[in-house]
Image (cartoon, rainbow, N blue to C red):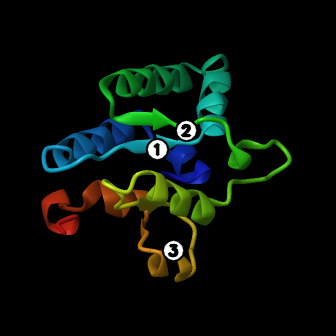
Amino acid sequence: MIDRAALESLSLCNMKKLSEILQELSRTGKWKWMLHYRDSRRLKENARLSAEAKEKKHFLNWCQEAGIVEVLPYHECDLTSRDQPDYLTCLVHLQVQNISARYPVFITDTTTDSTFGKNGILTMTANSFLTCSPSKTFTV
């Protein structure tokens, strides 16, 4: 899962690289990019305003069809009354729902507290995820 700020700063090139990493990781297990409904909707809205956002949305649609991206159903995180989702609670719920494949990675460019790690959630910056060696970083 990628937080909204990191998602918005990703270029189309980096989105493609991220999907390639996920495809490589999927050779040895189930890896998906989980996207909040609200973020998906925001990308659709932005696609009407800019060509780059339109290309990003088309790419994410392709990734969704290919099974790389999963848009989460509308839930509490997507309420417009919230400034941003409660990523920790959301990721913990996803761990429970996906018990057979529950190695969550939270990509954020903001500082997180140790609570994520204590709950078994690896946090990384977008740049560190894109430049890491998946076979070395994500072996269990």
Q: Name the residue rendered at 60%, 49% in the picture.
A: 4
Q: Name the residue rendered at 55%, 80% in the picture.
A: 115
Query: Which is nearer the N-term, disc 2 or disc 3?
Result: 2
User: Does 67 appear above or below 25?
Assistant: above
Q: Is residue 32 left or right of residue 27?
A: right
- Disc 1 is placed on an element classified as strand
**For the C terminus, which image quadrant?**
bottom left
* x and y percentages locating residue 87 in the rendered image: 60, 60
Query: Which is nearer the N-term, disc 3 or disc 1?
Result: 1
Residue matched to label 1 = 34
- Disc 2 is placed on an element classified as loop
Q: Which mark is residue 72?
A: 2
Q: Are marks 1 and 2 in contact (CB under 8 Å)?
A: yes
* x and y percentages locating residue 46 in the rendered image: 65, 26
Q: Which mark is residue 116?
A: 3
User: Does 130 appear above or below 124?
Assistant: above
Foreground: 113 or 47? Answer: 113
Q: Distance from label 2 to label 3 (Cα)? A: 20 Å
Q: Is residue 82 left or right of residue 45?
A: right
Q: Is residue 27 left or right of residue 31?
A: left
Q: Distance from label 3 to label 1 (Cα)? A: 17 Å
- Which picture quadrant has residue 131? bottom left
User: Does 16 appear above or below 140?
Assistant: above
In the picture as drawn, the residue positioned furthest to the right comes out as 81
